[in-house]
Image (cartoon, rainbow, N blue to C red):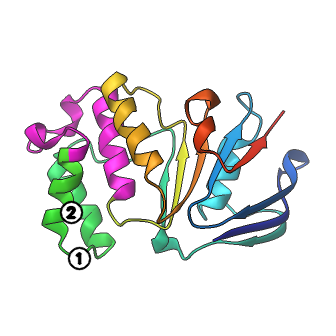
Amino acid sequence: MVRARNLSKRFDTRRIFDKVDIDLDVGGFLLVTGPNGSGKTTLLRVLAGLAAPTGGELELPVRGEIGYLGHEPLVYKQLTPHENLTLFARLYRVPDREQRIRSLLERFALWDVRDKEVATFSRGMQQRLGLGRVLLHEPKLLILDEPFNALDTAGAALLDEELATRSARAVVVATHDPERVEGLATERLGFA
């Protein structure tokens, strides 16, 4: 699934990370921790195929099998949740898209507001929609950067449940709250 050997990333002369090794298979859960500015987000962007490493070897699934949620939910605020997921379902060629969209909107407690403009949503509601977006195409590799940010207790519980049922995918999570997902982790990577 994900194989990295001596992976490194530099910006000009500044080393972001160096000599990172990862072996993550389906069902695996990589927990990435460290302070702000330590390279967690950059590593996740490299693992998502959004940035190129400057050294080492990296094997990833094809782009369409990766789901990435960064610090922003990356949804269109002028659209409704239903319109957002319909757009992304078309881009990913999701089969049975209406059924899948309804399932995700119900799962993330957005069904009742499916026709409301996302710009009117709280940050937590937008985060839940972002989670629906990254799960829409049932990725084999799910990469989440601080996914609990802005989620209330109910939203965090929904995410906990989703992360606990990962047998068909590999998961990478960067978080400042490692205790929350530590029991799920099969591998750990700490940045200083």
Q: Which amino acid is tagged 2?
A: Arg
Left or right: 167 as drawn, with respect to 44: left
Q: Residue furthest top?
A: 153
- Image position of 62 with respect to 49: above or below: below
Residue at 19%, 58% (x, y): give it. Answer: 101
Callout 2 touching callout 1 (CB < 8 Å) = yes
Residue 72, image quadrant: top left
**Residue 176 in view (yes/no):** no
Q: Earlier in the sequence, mark 2 or mark 1?
A: 1
* Apparent side of residue 11 relative to residue 124 in the rendered image (left or right): right
Q: Is residue 104 magenta?
A: no
Q: Is residue 34 left or right of residue 192?
A: left
Residue displayed at 15% across by 52% down: 82
Which quarter of the rendered picture does the C terminus lie within?
top right
Secondary structure that dominates the magenta span:
helix
Is residue 145 visible to us here? yes
Residue on which the image places disc 2: 100
Residues packed near mark 2 inside 10 Å, few (<14), some (14 to 19) or many (20 plus):
many
Q: Which residues are magenta?
A: 107-135
Query: Type of residue at label 1?
Result: Pro
Identify which residue is drawn at 75% across, 41% down.
39
